[in-house]
Image (spheres, grey):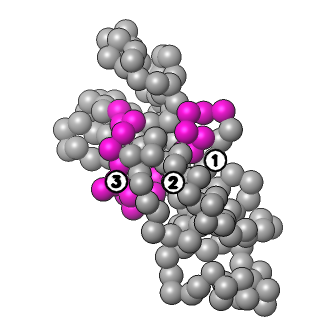
Amino acid sequence: MPELKFLFKSDKEKIIEKLNYYGIKKLPYLLCMSGKEKIRGYSGSLSKEELIDLNEEITLEIIGMYLLNTYEDVNSGLRLSFDAIYALKDQITKNILELDEKQAEEFMKGQDIALTKEDQEKFKDEPKGFKIIKYKKDNELIGTGKLTQDRIINYMPKERRLR
């Protein structure tokens, strides 16, 4: 059972600093760690102190929305969750890759996107690592992927994929 650990203001500021990689400048949530790598955001009416007291009475395993995963070795070190992309979409302005209709459909089905020579040329100046994926035609953010030399690795949750 993962222990819930609330993050201090200084930790939240460091996370927001890293989220600037995506253009995000503020997080209107109380942040807590869930497990080793997941960060969740809580925006309910209970204060941090009330949640800590409640956690002493009954063990809270999960509160709030899953926002992001932490990584040691990849660009900003943070990968936004599927839900966080929609919750923070008005702030996301950087590190966005646009896919065409065929690529977007493959991505929505959970497939990695193999990059053609043309795509590799198009993305050659993009730093490798986590990106927000956007469907060009509808200008809609559709998920998170990891750009490598020859593909975009898909992080679409299984329960959100098209069949």
* Residue lying at 57% horizontally and 87% vertically, measured from the top left: 46
Mark toward the viewer: 2 or 3: 2
> Where is residue 11 drawn, in percent x and y?
64, 58
Task: Kindly state the secondary structure of the residue where label 3 is placed.
Answer: loop
> Where is residue 155 drawn, in percent x and y?
52, 41
Q: CA distance from mark 2 to mark 1?
A: 13 Å
**Is residue 44 depicted above or below 112 in this figure?**
below
Residue identifier under label 1: 70
Q: Can you tell which mark lies on residue 16?
A: 2
Give, as a three-letter code, the residue at label 1: Thr
Query: Which is more toward the observer, 62 or 89?
Result: 89
- What range of the chain is rendered magenta? 73-97
Q: Is residue 85 left or right of residue 34?
A: left
* Visible residue check, residue 152: yes
Extreme-front residue of the structure: 10
Q: Are marks 2 and 3 in contact (CB under 8 Å)?
A: no
Q: Is residue 7 left or right of residue 21?
A: right
Q: Quadrant of the N terminus?
A: bottom right
Q: CA distance from mark 3 to mark 1?
A: 19 Å
**Residue 86 lies in magenta, yes or no?**
yes
Residue identifier under label 3: 91
* Residue lying at 27% horizontally and 47% vertically, measured from the top left: 140
Query: Which is more toward the observer, 151 or 17?
Result: 17
Task: Kindly state the secondary structure of the residue where label 2 is placed.
Answer: helix
> How many residues crowd around disc 1 within 10 Å: few (fewer than 14), some, or many (20 or more)?
some
Q: CA distance from mark 2 to mark 3?
A: 12 Å
Give, as a three-letter code, the residue at label 2: Ile
